[in-house]
Image (cartoon, rainbow, N blue to C red):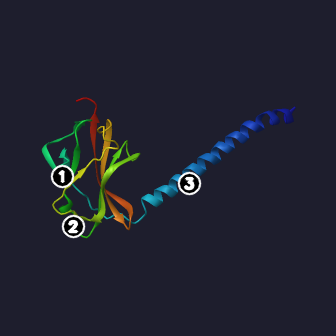
Amino acid sequence: MPDQRLAEVRPVFRFIVALGAAGLVILGVGLLQFINFEPPGQHTGLQARILGFWDYDQKTGAITGDPKDHFKTTERLAAEVDWAALPPDLLVGGHWFLGGFALDAGGVGPARAGDFGPKPAVPLQPPSDRGTPPGRYTFVVERYSGLKPVEVLARASVLVIGGR
């Protein structure tokens, strides 16, 4: 009788152990990704300043109007960054992402902060000519080591809503 109960429980026990092993593998892969994208010892304590989000004139390459916290899908927008507040030889970049870090939506860099000069605007580059898809866009200023981002210096979000 005890052998029959053990035989009934054995598949469930093996399934639970397999789930635990799969969880450990997922945790290990996540830890390796974290170490790869956020290497230990790379924190400098520097912070960049994102001055705001503005309407962007694609023809002149300039920001216009007043800063906003949301835009319509038909409007072009850009983030303004105070690159001069960073050490001029620091390798940095500014990039747009839709939905957290899911979809790259344009940006600048990596380049030395001093090379950006009087061009503080970083325009959002929509994935199509039909306008900017609605959603929450995140602008991130990152410090680079080589061609790999190693530290987030600033992050801000803006909402793009449907309508005209």
- Foreground residue, 111 or 24? 111
Neighbor class of circle 2 (other Cα within 10 Å; few <14, some 14-19, many 20+) is some
| Comparing labels 1 and 3, the label whose residue is closer to the camera | 1
Q: CA distance from mark 1 to mark 2?
A: 19 Å
Q: Identity of the amino acid at label 1?
A: Gly
Determine the image quadrant of residue 115: bottom left
Tell which residue pokes out farthest to the top in this image: 163
Query: What residue do we see at 31% from left, 46% from top?
Result: 138
> Is the residue 24 above or below the residue 150 in the image?
above
Marks 1 and 3, the one that precedes in the sequence: 3
99 sits left or right of 25 in the view: left
Within 10 Å of disc 3 (Cα), the crowding (few <14, some 14-19, many 20+) is few
Q: Residue at x 38, y 61 (%)?
A: 150
Question: Which residue is at 85% across, 33% downward?
Answer: 4
Tag 1 and tag 2, C-beta contact below 8 Å: no
Is residue 64 visible in the rendered structure shown here?
A: yes
Query: Which mark lies nearer to you, 1 or 2?
Result: 1
User: From mark 1 to mark 3, how far is it between C-alphas?
Assistant: 45 Å
Q: Which amino acid, by three-letter code, is at mark 3?
A: Gly
At label 2, the amino acid type is Gly
Under circle 3, the secondary element is helix
Q: Is residue 141 above or below residue 98?
A: below
| Disc 3 to disc 2, C-alpha distance | 39 Å
In x, y percent, where is residue 161?
A: 28, 33
Question: Which residue is denoted by mark 3 in the rendering?
Answer: 28
Camera-side mark, 3 or 2: 2
Residue 114: mark in rendering: 2
Q: Where is mark 1, residue-wise?
A: 61
Picture coordinates of residue 1 (x, y %)? 87, 31
